[in-house]
Image (spheres, helix red, strand yellow):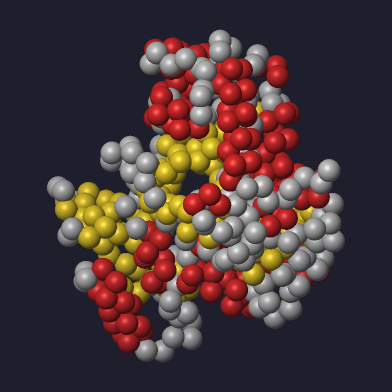
Amino acid sequence: MNRNPHPDRAAIAAGQIEQLRSLVAELFPSNKFYARKLQSAGITFDIASLPDFSARFPFTTKQELVADQLANPPFGSNLTYPLDRYTRFHQTSGTSGAPLRWLDTPESWDGMIECWTEIFRAAGVNAGDRVMFAFSFGPFLGFWLAFESAARLGCLCLPGGGMSSEARARMIFDHRATVLCCTPTYAIRLGEVARAAGAKSEIKTIIVAGEPGGSIPGTRKRIEELWPGARVFDHHGMTETGPVTYECPAQPGVLHVIESAYFAEVIDPASEKPASSGELVLTTLGRTGSPLLRYRTGDLVKCGVRNAECGTPPCACGRNEMTLEGGILGRADDMVIVRGVNVYPSAVEEIIRGFGEIVEYRVQVAQKNSLAELRLEIEPAKEVQNLADLLARVGGAFETAFSLRVPVSAVAPGTLPRFELKAQRWTKTSR
């Protein structure tokens, strides 16, 4: 019997509860972190349903995990098996605090490779493609998963670690790469280098992650302008969870949650009650060696669930998995309140990418007592002649979007840093 490629909501939920029960049963008593956490909360590991799980089981936070690793160095106590069962080590970037170290067993690793394979398939990548991985391979999870998944899929994999942008662009041309994997910021940077080189690329698919830019219309437009004939496919994941979503083939800017591997919830960050828009909470169903139960990711999303029983048809692509409209909208800890207005980095980037004359930018947040002020630096393209007009138009766009006057200044071409990994364009100072 052929497996249904797009199971309905009932089949998705049935698979999730089965995996969830097996996962939780495996944690007692071998996983010290969760055995201790759940027993202290009086939680029994019998689960009647998915709503029962959500109602009774506590959240897991990054702060708990960091504290556990500090108390139980170097890897913490969230390990279900003896250490010799683990073969993979990765860690987070640590951009918002201490990095988390994460170990995986071969079984958990294989499950996450399947998730990355789903991302490639949704993007139309197949064995005939030549995939350029334009980043330096370090301890971050996504690089290794993407590379191994593409190899298993039968693609020719082109590693771009330890190379200049010019050398990577040349590799794309010389080896006729058809797929590019990198961050949205670096897709722009590499596109500028490729354009300057003057050669025609055969890139048809650009898979991005690491920043919300892949689902920001202005950023997508800029990337696709620099790589004529290519389509951007967004996805997202985290070292501590693995690859979580892939972009809908039929709806750019909409992400599908890989619900065969994750039980996803959305809550109001303040009340912690279920909500249609709010913070994404994830339970990793197949990563038994180092699991997460109801992990508060800090990612802000707007969700849609396909439910045939309520008359909601499948997505335009035929899938019934949860959708995140507009991708990852921002981070709960990234929002800045400026004179009573909530400002997210993704909203700022959307404005900036509307100006093709801007090559790069930087935002300065000056905090004085409880008040925050924004200042924007832009790096114009070399061909810009009327800089005063550009500064005025950018300032006007911010005033229109936020009803705020944001001082905008320009720096000389080539001044602002370029980023290969996650861009760090926001700086915060206290006055």
Give how far across and how far down residue 284 sits, in percent: 57, 33
Viewer-proximal residue among 325 and 244: 325
Picture coordinates of residue 81, whole percent (x, y): 64, 16
Q: Nearer the viewer, residue 319 or 246?
A: 319
| Quadrant where the N terminus is found in the figure | top right
- Give the side of residue 336 with respect to residue 422, left or right: left
Q: Name the residue at 66% across, 47% down.
A: 7
Q: Is residue 91 above or below residue 244?
A: above
Q: How many marks?
A: 0
| Vertical order, 309 against 74 (above or below) | below
In the orientation shown, which residue stands out farthest toward the top?
29
Which of 315 and 208 lies nearest the eye of the viewer? 315
Residues 39 and 181: in front is 39
Which image quadrant is residue 338 in? bottom left
Regarding residue 100, the answer to whether it shows in the image is no
Residue 27 image-quadrant placement: top right
Q: Indicate left or right for 146 with 350 as reference.
A: right
**Quadrant location of residue 411?**
bottom left
In the depicted structure, whether residue 204 falls above or below residue 103: below
- Which residue: 53% across, 63% down? 253
Can you see residue 352? yes
Q: Position of residue 389 (x, y in %)?
A: 32, 87
Q: Which residue is drawn at the image coordinates 25% and 74% (left, top)?
A: 399
State the residue lying farthest toward the bottom.
385
Residue 70 location (% of width, % of height): 44, 21
Which residue does the image show at 70% across and 16% down from the upper left?
84
